[in-house]
Amino acid sequence: MTGTDTDAGKTTVVAALLRAFCLKGLPCRAIKPVQTGCTRNNGTLYVPDLFHYTDAVRYQTNISPDIRALACFEPACSPHLASLKTGVRLEAEDLAAKARAEMADGRFTLIEGAGGIYAPLNERQHILDLMLALGLPVLLVAPNRLGCINQALMAMRVLAETPLPAAGLVLCETSPADDGNRDLLPENSAYLARHAPEFGFPLLCELPFLPELASQDDRARRRGWQKLSEFLGPAADRLAALCSPEPEDIAADDAAFVWHPYAGAVPAPKTYEAVAAEGSRIRLSDGRSLIDGMSSWWCANLGYGRADLQLALARQARMLPHVMFGGFAHAPATRLAKKLLAIAPPGLGKVFFADSGSVAVEVALKMAIQYQLAAGNSRKTRFCALLGAYHGDTLGAMSVCDPVNGMHHVFAGYLPGQIFLDRPRARFGGEPDIEDLENMEKRLRAHSDELAAVIVEPIVQGAGGMWFYHPEYLKRLRELCAELGILLIADEIATGFGRTGRLFACEWAGISPDILCLGKALTGGMMSFSAVLASGRVAEAISSPKDDSVPGVLLHGPTFMANPLACSVALQAIETLLAFPWQENAARIGQRLAEGLEPCRNLPGVEDVRALGAIGVVETKKPVDTERMQAFFVESGVWIRPFSRLVYLMPPLVAANDEIDALCAAIRKACERGLHL
């Protein structure tokens, strides 16, 4: 139960509904999570709203409801200020957990918020955060008076953009209308009756002002509460039906109908139902909160629940959610392309938008082949990559992944045969390895006449092994590609946007690629999206082929290319990142990861421990049992998903020190217990 503002009539509506449920013989309760303005009398705390609840149900009802407040404060101000004045900190998750504990017995429960939806709980959370943490249907109460239409529609629009089910709207006369405003009330009702359903909030009823409720006479108050409970009868029926749906078993349905990544379909893998996420934490359906050590496969670099990204998405959805990109231009794509070229390594001049990281790699490979064909180099159709590489799951991307130990080796007979360089041995932070550089040069020169491009993950080989190699290798590779007429493709899908401690990992070597692939954190983890940045030389060559038989267009065009929603969110995510101390945070997180994981180095079964930027890795000597280890991590309150021989961390750049420490402690404890063996 929430209102458009303070004194909207919420308490009166809750009390009357409570009476209506009691008269129906329905076991019920009312909870006030936060109550301010309490008074003391001889040491006893008087909670005003609870008095109204009790007063409404004490007259001729069939059952006695459970009525309580969870946090009470004497200062008569917002929950945030009242708690500050008394040295208590309110947290939405804590209040929601306490409320859920009260609700465990299955009684129908009415929960009344404090003030409006944006009444502050603390310096960053509002009553809306408590509502989201609870996930219950919402009944909105608006006072029927001058200004109520504006306030009600604004509140409903905000609520309509949340996943909270809408129960409806109740209009409540909170004071006697004078003769001058009397004719406003039916007009307000008629207007809201027409427009509230657009936001999913049907007008359920209008409650008149009843002076009997303020009477000192018990019989008068009883008549008043009875009248209100009768007015609210239909609303009570709707709420009872809405809150008693057919039970849904997400775990069973997931196992029956869904096929998860890198898993068999039968039997279904063990999964955990996520229902919400905020900051660096993911909340499960059972109420547990997990510290996210993976940034949801490295894309949620800014953490979860960011209002600025949500607003960017909502604003664009109202204007232009999508339009085909063939023949149309739109501001979100143009602005994003301009911004990406401004922050990317120098020399890149055009942006091609795609759907995902794997598709970005496909586009980059096609660009390289078309570039060589357009330049008259028809024999240059193969690619070179590093052993240990991972570039995606689509066919072209798989062909440049590690051919021996990679996850795609089973498709080896169906993929184009590519050329592979030994993985650089020289570690990041160590000394360059001359033999690394000589072997790379020898192999590139031997195949220069057939190579369209070399594709690498700069500095950090991600899913192929979390290996951090020396920048000198990348620098020399850039020089050789330029000399031999081979394009250099930098796959920064995992490393871009600050993950390694530089905005782009190429900056560690001071180089610019011919083609740059971006994805994952491009939208701050909000949605799948990618971009391929090409140099002006590559774009011009493809557009002006020497041979008329070669098309002068790039032969790729996703249906949802440059989706305006994704472009708007990506642009906001970049602006947010650049305004955020990402570099300091990456350094802080990296140092803490290095220190927190180092004790694992001398444990049995551990091959190596390493950290770079906001990445920390414990490499084991043999593949770990992912499901077993993951279950331990969930019980420890963290979300870490190992794969093969890697137990690694890539937490959001907003993660706090205590969260990083908890992640590291969980890995240490797992290794100390031998769960990696």
Image (cartoon, grey):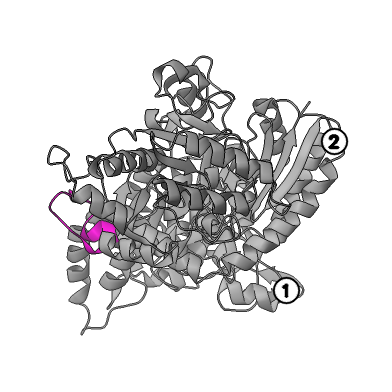
- Residue 107 in percent (x, y) is at 54, 41
Q: Earlier in the sequence, mark 2 or mark 1?
A: 1
Q: Is residue 405 above or below residue 372?
A: above
Residue picked out by circle 2: 672
Does residue 66 appear in this view?
no
Q: Secondary structure at mark 1?
A: loop
Amino acid carrying label 1: it is Gly
Residue 327 counted in the magenta span: yes
Q: Main secondary structure of the magenta part?
A: loop
Mark 2 against mark 1, which lies toward the viewer? 2
Give neighbour class at mark 1: few <14, some 14-19, many 20+ (Cα, 10 Å).
few
Please, is residue 662 above or below residue 536 in the view? above
Horizontal side, residue 405 vs residue 9: left or right = right
Residue highlighted by disc 1: 87
Instruction: Examine the image and state in which quarter residue 248 appears.
Output: top left
The magenta segment: 316-331
